[in-house]
Amino acid sequence: MQTIKDTLLTLARAYGATGRESNIASTIRGMIEPYVDEITTDALGNLIATRKGAGKKIMVAAHMDHIGFIVTHIDKKGFLRVHNVGGINRANSLNRRVVFANGVNGVLSHEVEDFNPASSPMSKLFIDIGARSREEAEAMVDVGDVAVYAPDVFEMGQRVSGPAMDNRAGCALLVEALKALESRENTVVAVFTTQEEVGLRGAAVAAYGVAPDEGVALDVTLCGDTPKGVKISVELGAGIAVKVMDSSLICAPSMVKALESAAERAGAKHQREVLTGGGTDAGAIAQSRGGVPSGVLSIPCRYVHSAAETVDLSDMEAGVKTLVEYLSH
Ligand code: CO
Ligand code: ZN
């Protein structure tokens, strides 16, 4: 599991906020270049890598963006006011270290008076970057810059925790699958997508451009195995999850079957996932052009959309094996 771990650690530490993916895209490009025939980037910043083959054209999408905080304005004292980009849980965000693309650090904090972590709006939050005035702050950060949870990534046994497992775990799975893939049975178009966290925007245009015969998204999903946790059957460490439904799509039964039998053939541990909230890039792929049969391999993840999202490397390994087997037939 050393290689997938190294890939995951590298990707999890790279900056790449939603709508600001060029840095993570170039990191991924460097990793996959030797294993594909062609790499392009489209107008929305999707990184599109093609490995030509004989049969079907299969689009495999993993979003590389990461939820963050966009600076809306800077006050007189140099505090940055922010809005969320993607599904930020405010209670998970308080008094945390955040970092901008240019390396500027900050503390994300909140007004104290009348503050309720569950219900107070984003306008009650601010970032303190150590500036003593608006002028000092403006020399460090611009309105429109996006901060993310600082990349505090660490190992716990065979598990890895950090802020951007959603979805650098999916990106790492796709990178490792491209490295392992030997077959030229199908044309594989690996798309590292942008702006998933604000509504599957990158995947929507990429799917139109690629026009695949089948689509697979790789993303994280929730786990229900923590004390009094959310109601979902998925467990961390119980294998790669084959999605049946989420709020963005009902997976094509043919795809659920194909992914499950690929897992069986590969001898990979797998489980089923029904997620009652949240979507994935597969939702956009499924509804592109005249419709595309689509499915999802989900990596079980605890504490999703917090700064300590936690995945299990054995689930990711099972995902690599399953995906490679599926793409080879
Ligand atoms: Co997400
Ligand atoms: Zn995601």
Image: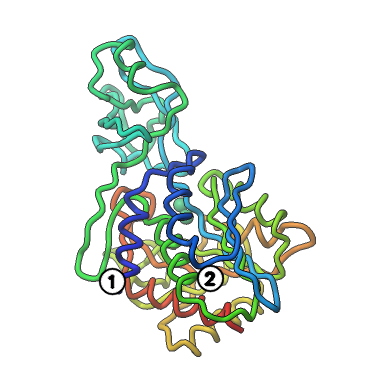
Residue 44 percent location from the top left of the image: 61, 43
Q: CA distance from mark 2 to mark 1?
A: 27 Å
Mark 1 secondary-structure assignment: helix
Closer to the camera in the image, 26 or 154: 26
Closer to the camera in the image, 177 or 300: 177
Question: Relative to 302, is 16 above or below?
Answer: above
| Residue beneath the point at 62% across and 62% down | 249
How is the model colour-coded? rainbow
Q: Which mark is residue 323?
A: none
Q: Nearer the viewer, mark 2 or mark 1?
A: 1
Q: Is residue 209 left or right of residue 112?
A: right
Q: Does the beta carbon of the residue at mark 2 sit less than 8 Å from ligand 2?
A: no
Q: Residues within 10 Å of mark 2 (few under 14, many from 20)?
A: many
Q: Residue furthest right?
A: 290
Q: Does the beta carbon of the residue at mark 1 sit less than 8 Å from ligand 2?
A: no
Q: Earlier in the sequence, mark 2 or mark 1?
A: 1
Camera sees residue 220: no
| Residue beneath the point at 38% across and 31% down | 120
Residue 252 percent location from the top left of the image: 66, 73
Q: Residues within 10 Å of mark 1 (few under 14, many from 20)?
A: few
Question: Relative to 309, is 19 above or below?
Answer: above
Camera sees residue 156: yes
Residue 154 percent location from the top left of the image: 22, 57
Mark 2 secondary-structure assignment: strand
Quarter of image, res 294: bottom right
Task: Look at label 2 and name its amino acid.
Answer: Lys
Residue position for label 1: 2
| Residue beneath the point at 48% across and 49% down | 25
Query: Which quarter of the figure is the N terminus placed in?
Result: bottom left
Residue position for label 2: 243
| Residue beneath the point at 58% across and 77% down | 327
Q: Is residue 146 left or right of residue 287?
A: left
